[in-house]
């Protein structure tokens, strides 16, 4: 993966699961809503449905590492339009946010070319969750019986908990009903 920082602790996990950590097996993708080298508060772009209407750049940014052969997306950074809006002056109305705004939207957009080539997505790895709702969903998945007091819940270093997409915990994290 090549960042010389032990891949933020992921190297051991990847190696333990027989997944390559060679830089050439990974595509690194950065998606940013606006040019972060310039003042984002001054950046606009035409609305896709009405070119006369100017929208403002939110500064949202997502950094992903993708391995199509192994079917893995690693979400390194995820700062949504809502998250970045707190830094915009004036604030951008929610109805003016881009249509693609959640991490899942961005991951699908980035993965689509691999999907179209027949790659199968096997796992998504993320190590940050700043959104309060997401944090509560993860805490519940870690302790579905609520046996651990909230004050003692903490993510531990690898080996950590993981879930398949068809488990109740996985369904909750992916936003699917556990009753279907």
Image (cartoon, rainbow, N blue to C red):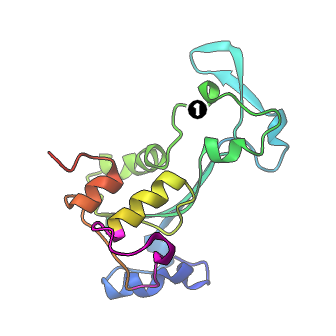
* Residue 28 place in picture, x, y as percent: 54, 63
Residue 121 higher or lower than 9, as above or below: above
Res 124 seen here: no
Residue 10, above or below 93: below
Q: Residue at x 43, y 73 (%)?
A: 149
Residue furthest to the left = 180
Q: Residue at x 45, y 59 (%)?
A: 136
Q: Main secondary structure of the magenta part?
A: loop
Q: Residue at x 73, y 44 (%)?
A: 86
**92 left or right of 132 in image:** right
Q: Position of residue 80 (x, y in %)?
A: 59, 47
Q: Based on the displayed image, in which of its 4 quarters is residue 144 positioned? A: bottom left
Q: Nearer the viewer, residue 95 or 14?
A: 95
Residue range corresponding to the magenta coloring:
142-158
Q: Are there few (<14), some (14-19), or many (20+) residues within 10 Å of tag 1?
A: some
Magenta stretch containing residue 28, yes or no? no
Q: Is residue 139 above or below residue 58?
A: below
**Camera-nearest residue between 96 and 10:** 96
Helix, strand or loop at label 1? It is: loop
Q: How many marks?
A: 1
Image check: 109 left or right of 55? left
Q: Indicate the position of residue 15 as horizontal and vertical percent values.
A: 37, 86
Q: Circle 1 sits on which residue?
A: 98
Picture residue at 75% right of the left edge, 44% below the top? 35
Determine if residue 10 is in view.
Answer: yes
């Amino acid at each position: 993966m090549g960042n010389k920082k032990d891949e933020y602790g992921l190297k051991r996990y990847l190696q333990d699961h027989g997944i390559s950590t060679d830089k050439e097996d990974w595509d690194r993708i950065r998606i940013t809503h606006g040019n972060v080298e310039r003042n984002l508060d001054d950046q606009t772009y035409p609305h896709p449905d009405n070119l006369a209407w100017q929208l403002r750049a939110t500064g949202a940014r997502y950094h992903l590492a993708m391995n199509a052969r192994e079917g893995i997306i690693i979400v390194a950074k995820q700062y949504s339009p809502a998250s970045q809006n707190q830094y915009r002056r004036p604030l951008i109305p929610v109805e003016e946010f881009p249509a693609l705004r959640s991490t899942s939207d961005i991951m699908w957009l980035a993965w689509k070319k691999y999907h179209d080539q027949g790659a199968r997505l096997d796992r998504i790895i993320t190590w940050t969750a700043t959104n309060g709702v997401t944090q509560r969903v993860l805490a519940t998945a870690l302790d579905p019986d609520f046996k651990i007091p909230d004050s003692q819940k903490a993510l531990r270093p690898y080996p950590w908990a993981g879930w398949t997409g068809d488990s109740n915990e996985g369904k909750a994290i992916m936003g699917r009903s556990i009753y279907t």
